[in-house]
Amino acid sequence: MTSNCRRPEHTAPPELFYNEVEAKKYSQNSRMIEIQTQMSERAVELLNLPEGQPCFLLDVGCGSGLSGDFLSEEGHYWVGVDISTAMLDVALDREVEGDLLVGDMGHGMPFRPGTFDGCISISALQWLCNADKRSHSPPKRLYTFFSTLYSSLSRGSRAIFQLYPENSEQLELITTQAMRAGFGGGMVVDYPNSSKAKKFFLCLFAGVIGSLPKGLGTETSDRAVSNQVQYSGQRCRFKGMKGKSAKKGRDWILEKKERRRRQGREVRVDTKYTARQRKPHF
Amino acid sequence: MKLLTHNMLTSHVKGVTKGYPLLIKATEVKVNEVEFNPQFVSRMIPKLEWSALVQAADELGHRQDLPVELVPEYEKNEEFLKKVHRVLLEVEVIEGCLRCPESGREFPISRGIPNMLLNDDEV
């Protein structure tokens, strides 16, 4: 996203980082525009909206309206919220079709219950994880955001967040607060084996049990191998798992079976089929 | 800010129980031409607070012949849907402010964008 390797959240709070200069990049840098559009496309795909129906959507961290434009192209109506007036000014200049609001995600979403058919957010959620003021408590702000978002979504709709998580602690912080707020769902990782193409999408379901969509670039490789490779790649990246394996991975299942054997329970023999990916059913 | 958005907006200031509907004080209003999509309008009507919509349209002086009560069987009534479409999506508040009915707190609207940022003590 940025030309240097540092994370933007460590430079300044979003309303200062996204000033006129940065905002200009979003309207002129074709590569930036292309990436943002691609991610918006994938987010809408993950939203799983009913076919051929114009929906009313929320775009959190809409910025200059790149993602919003894609929503309009798909025939949807949307409301965008952003904290940076410079970015929203660019959106106005670009004459986006959605309605815009200046707001802080951490203050909560100011909408009536059941307003939206869905929500997308591109490259914004990680900003909530940093305390930009002494009065900020990231877990509290995250919870305020997720709980008000949950209520403003109609039952059965989804919220898709493309984000750049800094580490596993941050991911855990985010998912914990989202679950506390009532959401179901989880992370979808596209192209997990490519450091360049890898993208994280937090898929949250409001009030419905759904099966998590599959990440892109995970189907082609051999089943058993892909589980291992995918898994060890994540393990190297995220160190702070408190010595335990990631939930539901093959290692976690083998460990759990060992535990239960030690407890004296009857446990099936470990074979090559143990922890095999099954088709989602429900 | 279009009236569709206004119909969904509430005050989210801590301690406020009835922050809806926000009263509109507009100094500049614009009417655009927006493509009519009967399917979308029909789907939005059940989500609306009808009385708040009528009140808002009145406050802006753009109510025209929008009925006070929701017309039954509106899905096929194209004339009615067109009236709703105009009020929801074509009337836009450019400058003014939104006032909380309970606390009187004002959210300014500038260039069509309401500012919903809260102060530290309001969160």
Image (cartoon, rainbow, N blue to C red):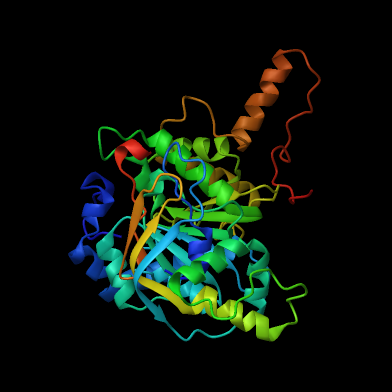
Rendering quarter of residue A117: bottom right
What is the residue that sits farthest to the right in this orientation?
A: A266
* Residue A214 visible in this rendered orientation of the protein: no
Residue A268 location in percent, x, y? 79, 28
Rendering quarter of residue B93: bottom left
Dividing the image into 4 quarters, which one contains the C terminus of chain B?
A: top left
Where is B69 relative to A266, above or below?
A: below
Front in this rendered view, residue B63 or A117: B63
Q: How many numbered marks does the figure carry?
A: 0
Front in this rendered view, residue A175 or B122: B122
Residue A113 location in percent, x, y? 59, 51
What residue is shown at x 56% (from left), y 39% (from top)? A181
What residue is shown at x 37% (from left), y 44% (from top)? A128
What residue is shown at x 38% (from left), y 48% (from top)? B104
Residue B31 location in percent, x, y? 43, 82
Front in this rendered view, residue A151 or A12: A151
Residue A243 location in percent, x, y? 48, 24
What residue is shown at x 67% (from left), y 86% (from top)? B79
Dividing the image into 4 quarters, which one contains the N terminus of chain B?
A: bottom left
Rendering quarter of residue A51: bottom right
Where is B71 relative to A176, above or below?
A: below
* Residue A268 visible in this rendered orientation of the protein: yes
Is residue A54 left or right of B107 when viewed as pictured? right
Front in this rendered view, residue A261 or B2: B2
What is the residue that sits farthest to the left in this orientation?
A: A21
